[in-house]
Image (cartoon, rainbow, N blue to C red):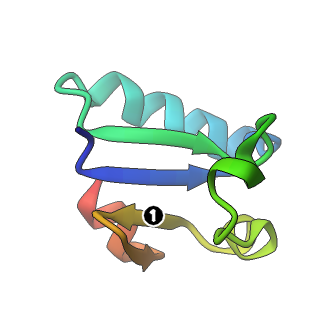
Amino acid sequence: MAELTLFYDGTCPLCVNEINHLKRLDRAQRITFEDIHAEGFTSRYPDVDREEASAILLGDVHGRRIRGLDVTHRA
């Protein structure tokens, strides 16, 4: 089970580049990466506000929402 779910904007080239870098570093697969624009996202994560997730990095650690640098630090 992942230790962190990281929500990112898959339409943002900079975001996608950073996520791809994190994916390469996450060899133990402890991070689940969720594109907020992926099909079915809102049904899987109805409590995640896409506008907020587009404005600030959002993550989830065992049901607890974290934001910004806390997500970066955890990743």
Residue 29's x, y, as percent?
26, 28
Image position, residue 69 (x, y; %): 39, 74
Residue at x 32% of width, y 53% of height:
4
Horizontal side, residue 68 vs residue 50: left or right: left
Q: Position of residue 44 (x, y in %)?
A: 64, 49
Q: Which residue appears at 41% of the width and 51% of the height?
A: 5
Say which amino acid is labelled 1.
Answer: Gly
Point 51% across, 38% down: residue:
19
- Outermost residue on the front side: it is 43
- Is residue 55 found left or right of 15 in the rendered image? right
Which residue is at 78% across, 45% downward?
Answer: 12
Q: Give the residue number, with chain letter if any, for mark 1.
A: 59
Number of marks: 1
The foreground one among 67 and 3 is 3
- Vertical placement of residue 53 versus 45, above or below: below
In the displayed structure, 27 sits above or below 18; it is above
Q: Residue 38: give x, y in percent of width and height.
A: 76, 37
